[in-house]
Amino acid sequence: MTTIAKTRFIGGALAVALALSASRCAAEGKTAQLIIRADQGKDTINRNIYGHFSEHLGHCIYGGYWVGPDSSIPNTRGIRNDVVQALREIRIPVLRWPGGCFADEYHWKDGIGPQENRPSMVNTHWGGVTENNHFGTHEFLDLCEQLGCEPYICGNLGSGSVEEMADWVEYITFDGKSPMADLRRKNGRDQPWKLKYFGVGNENWGCGGSMRPEYYADQYRRYQTYVKNFSGNQIFKIACGPNGANYEWTEVLMRDLAAGRRPMLQGLAPHYYCGTGSKSRAATKFTEVDWFSNLQRALRIEELLNGHEKLMDKYDPPKRVAIIFDEWGAWHAVEPGTNPGFLYQQNSLRDAMVAGLTLNIFNNHADRVKMANIAQTVNVLQAMILTDGPKMLLTPTYYVYLLYKVHHDATLLPTELAGPEYAFEQDKVPAMNVSASRDNSGKVHVSLVNIDPHNAVEVKAQLEGLRAKRINGQILTAGEITTHNTFEKPDTVEPASFNDAKATDGGFTATLPAKSIVVLEIEG
Ligand code: AHR
């Protein structure tokens, strides 16, 4: 059996004929036929699709980034250098903070001024621990400057006031004389920061206030009115989006906020977690049933995007409102012996697959998806980095971000893929997915994911508009589906060179091993 996966570009009669013949060819064995239209493409893959999310949750902020200036762990103004360096390597483009559910109980004024004077609070969502507010607005914006990324702040609509939200934006961005700008100066920062991305609440259908969409839409209208553009700073306002397949949420928000001459939002932020396995929820102790079910749920994000985009197109055909997919990823059981409220999980080759295929899907929706933020960067859920005191390791998911950075701000190329299926018990899913882009220098990059844990797939690719002269590749794979990096053996899963791609007359061939991710660079 064969599946034909097309991107959302409509091909001509030739494309259909090729795809059909490809489908017949693929039906005969584990081969896939790929067409890449290297001379086409109109949408840019916004680098913010490779964005991140970090919440005051477990050891993401405290221990993950923040160790304090007096720590023996090398740091710059309290922020650990090893973590900053690792995230700079993947060119982290944007970081969302302070939550998550935490955002709608966070009162930012508790997190400014001398640290010893900052009041503490209870982090009710995440372990009921005491939050001492040592990491606040100044520390977060310093972190973003060290990382060289855009800050994305989520405001408190659920339990905060309109005034509090308005004051935060004024505090950060106003360069004149005002109560908030003066307070910022008193706290040591003379110049305002630039702040583009601002979320008006988080999951307000749940932890952010249990609101109905109509109620949230009205609240959003009111709060966003006071989120002002000061001193040349232009805010991109992001509304809380739907949970998974809650299409009613998208319909009501688009109808009430986006249908007018000037939309009241620039971004809508859906959330979707693909969960974990069917039998075992463990991050590293699972069998094929869990591998299959987790990846099947990860692939569902394509269907969700299509559903929400259809509604967005209904109210906003010119695509003025972007999808900002600001929480996604795999959610497994916490590591044994750790605080259940801290969401600390290991990260295996399976998580790399989740990342690789999801990022391909986001790339292919680049006309509407302008940002995505995997949850969460350090020590929480599908993390890039795990730390243990002074030790740090990079997860398989991190390496997907390292390999895929070639897609940042590149032009998305139309692709068509006719490939084999991966069948397990009574069910099946496409074994492969793909996205391709052309960068400023004309190089084409193709990211291919083969989730079948047993079978290699031979990809026969036709490159339209480019004659491949040189092909380089990198591969991420491992011996077992559960393979992962540990503090004792941190280099178990790492990218390696891939030399199994060859230029052919009209394109190239490449044999993808079972359970692998390959990124090719093609020069004409
Ligand atoms: O990422 C963990 C939590 O998941 C976030 O705080 C919340 O927004 C979502 O439910």
Image: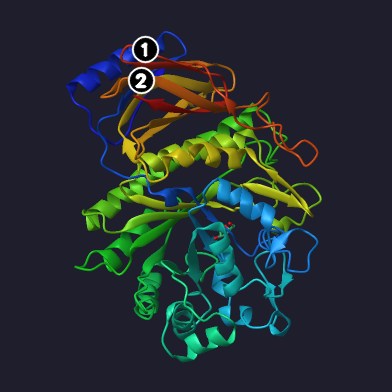
**Rendering quarter of residue 341:** bottom right
Q: Position of residue 217 (x, y in %)?
A: 36, 70
Q: Residue 30: which numbered mark, if any?
A: none
415 vs 359, left or right, is left
Q: Position of residue 370 (x, y in %)?
A: 37, 52
Return the residue nearer the eye: 513 or 293. 513
Q: Position of residue 140 (x, y in %)?
A: 58, 68
Residue type, mark 2 in image? Ala
Residue type, mark 1 in image? Thr
In the image, what residue occupies the spot 61% across and 70% down?
Answer: 139
Return the residue nearer the eye: 292 or 364. 364
139 vs 252, left or right, is right
Which residue was labeled with disc 1?
504
119 vs 329, left or right, is right
As drawn, 436 above or below 77 = above
Q: Secondary structure at mark 1?
A: loop
Q: Secondary structure at mark 2?
A: loop
Residue at far top of view: 28
Return the residue nearer the eye: 432 or 143. 143
As drawn, 233 above or below 439 = below
Q: Residue 468: which numbered mark, if any?
A: 2
497 vs 20, left or right, is right
Residues packed near mark 2 inside 10 Å, few (<14), some (14 to 19) or many (20 plus): many
**For the N terminus, which image quadrant?**
top left
Spatial CA distance of label 1 from label 2 is 8 Å
**Are the residues tagged 1 and 2 within 8 Å (C-beta)?**
yes
